[in-house]
Image (tube, rainbow, N blue to C red):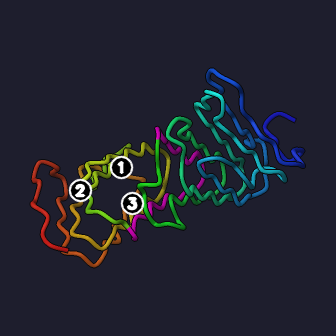
């Protein structure tokens, strides 16, 4: 059936010997809430079997798209692949998306990622509580950006149609810029134990980060 992955009863491995392979894991017609786990090489929980994607012999999986259905889904994104990235759409239902809930380090996110909560009351949790570097967070109505210091690794997370956005920051002295939010998406900043600075409505005030 279109949009149902429950008939995938055994593990499935996708790869090729060269070129670019797009991969769509489409469970959008499923009305049962699922517990889904995505990492840099696999997707589990949408089907009975695990979908593995590999990059061997010069092959590139890009993009990786995962769609869940109308149930209340919980999706944990442990890490992403630098070439595959991730396009995640959780469809209907009251869904929860957790980014890096195990390592609590958003540096595990590689490549292009975007999250669409769809309909329902959806929560997006970004967990960087165990970060190993300072961060400059910038929140706008359609994306969150995290710039790590001193490496200047930059992670940008576009998001849409979530009814709650939660950021769990690390223990260093971080800077949080909240430039804009939508009327339907309350933002919660759970800041760590460092000497943090907050700029609400003004990202140009780049406060010098103090000692952690």
User: Which residue is drawn at the image coordinates 66% and 26% (left, top)?
Assistant: 21
165 falls in the magenta region? no
Quadrant (top left/top right/bottom left/bottom right) for the N terminus:
top right
**Residue under circle 1?**
144
Which quadrant would residue 130 be assigned to in this image? Answer: bottom left
Secondary structure under the numbered disc 1 in the rendered image: strand
**Which x, y percent locates residue 123?**
52, 60
| Residue 180 image position (x, y, % from top left) | 27, 49
Secondary structure under tag 3 reads loop
Label placed on residue 100: none
* Element type at mark 2: strand
Q: Residue furthest bottom?
A: 193
Closer to the camera in the image, 103 or 86 = 103
Is the residue under label 3 in contact with that under label 1 (CB below 8 Å)?
no
Q: Earlier in the sequence, mark 2 or mark 1?
A: 1
State which region is magenta.
Answer: 111-130
Residue 121 colored in magenta in the image: yes
Q: Nearer the viewer, residue 16 or 162?
A: 16
First reached walking from the N terminus: tag 3 or tag 2: 2
Q: Name the disc covering residue 149, or none.
A: 2
Q: Which residue is mark 3?
A: 186
Q: Is residue 185 left or right of residue 1?
A: left
Where's residue 13, x and y in %? Answer: 77, 40
Question: Which residue appears at 28% of the width and 51% of the height?
Answer: 147
How far apart are labels 2 and 1 at the CA level? 16 Å
Q: Could you tell me residue 194's position as x and y percent?
A: 23, 75
Q: Is residue 76 left or right of residue 202?
A: right
Using the image, determine if residue 135 lies above or below residue 84: below
Closer mark to the observer between disc 1 and disc 3: 1
**Few, some or many C-alpha atoms within 10 Å of disc 2 (few <14, some 14-19, many ≥20)?**
some
Query: Looking at the figure, which quarter contains the C terminus?
Result: bottom left
Local packing at callout 3 (Cα closer than 10 Å; few below 14, some 14-19, many 20+) is few
């Amino acid at each position: 059936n279109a949009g149902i992955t429950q008939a995938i009863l055994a593990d499935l491995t996708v790869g090729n010997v060269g070129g670019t392979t797009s991969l769509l894991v489409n469970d959008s017609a499923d009305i049962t809430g699922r517990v889904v786990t995505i990492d840099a090489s696999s997707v589990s929980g949408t089907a009975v079997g695990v979908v593995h994607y590999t990059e061997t012999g010069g092959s590139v999986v890009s993009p990786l798209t995962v769609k869940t259905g109308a149930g209340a889904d919980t999706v944990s994104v442990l890490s992403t692949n630098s070439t595959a990235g991730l396009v995640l759409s959780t469809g209907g239902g009251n869904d929860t998306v957790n980014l890096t809930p195990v390592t609590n380090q958003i540096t595990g996110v590689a490549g292009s990622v975007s999250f669409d909560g769809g309909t329902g009351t959806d929560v997006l949790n970004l967990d960087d509580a165990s970060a190993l570097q300072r961060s400059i967070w910038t929140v706008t109505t359609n994306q969150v950006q995290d710039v790590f210091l001193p490496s200047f690794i930059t992670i940008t997370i576009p998001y849409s149609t979530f009814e709650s956005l939660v950021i769990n920051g690390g223990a260093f002295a971080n800077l949080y810029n909240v430039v804009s939010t939508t009327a339907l998406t309350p933002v919660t900043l759970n800041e760590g134990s460092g000497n943090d600075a907050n700029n609400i409505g003004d990202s140009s005030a780049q406060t010098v980060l103090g000692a952690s």
